[in-house]
Amino acid sequence: MLLGLVGTALMVAMLVYTLRKVLVRARWLGPTSAWLHFHIVCGVGGPLCILLHSGLLVWPRGLIAVGFWCMVAVALSGGFGRYVYGLLPRASGGRELCWDAAQARLADLREVLVLGSPAEIDTAAEEKLRLERALKISGLARRLFRYWHLFHRPIAGAMYVIVALHVASAVLFGGSLAQLAQL
């Protein structure tokens, strides 16, 4: 039962990232990139704890089976979403670039390659190649990311509803409060 509680807590903690993205002006909470890493760690740790909580039961039944497979789908699609997110063009500091900013950065890099000092050229050439490659696939990556959200969010929502029902039924009908008091 303890693994179920830890897994559920980690999965609920993942929602803090979503909240941080919505609260754009809450910069005092830290950068969204740090919250994304936290979201990913919780998104791996939570399902692992839930899997262990289930006793490695591969084929759950009933409503919990739906919740289990929603969790698996959310975790796997999260990995895919992180991969697609990594394809979007970024500045050298890691921040995502819009198309115009990426084009402006490419112009700057071309100027460095033509007029820059020899010490700068290797770094500028490497960044230019990386940015050109990212721009070539950015349209596809942005479309994939948009469609990914259409899949990931509703499945995650269904997962959270089923987890809440499972926890409520365990507390109300499964004697979980008595087991928790014995820990």
Image: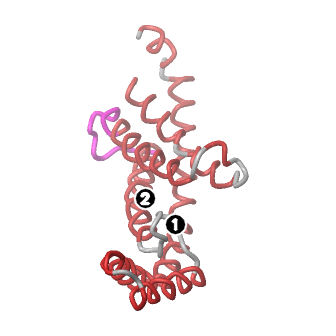
Q: Main secondary structure of the magenta part?
A: loop
Residue 174 located left or right of residue 26: left
- As displayed, is residue 118 above or below residue 145? below
Q: Which residue is at a point 56% across and 59% down the rendered structure image?
A: 153
Q: Residue at x 57, y 49 (%)?
A: 17
Q: Which residues are magenta?
A: 51-62
Helix, strand or loop under label 2: helix
In which quadrant is the N terminus drawn? top left
Instruction: In this rendered view, identify the residue nearer to me: 103 or 88.
Output: 103
Marked residue nearer the N-terminal end (1 or 2): 2
Q: What is the x, y in percent for residue 35?
A: 52, 48
Image mark for residue 78:
2
Report how far apart the C-alphas of labels 1 and 2 lie in the structure.
10 Å
Where does label 1 land, which residue?
151
Residue 113 pos. (x, y %): 39, 87
Q: Residues within 10 Å of mark 1 (few under 14, many from 20)?
A: some
The secondary structure type at the circle numbered 1 is helix
Tag of residue 38: none
- In the rendered view, tell whether residue 84 sits above or below residue 72: below
Q: Position of residue 161 (x, y in %)?
A: 58, 45
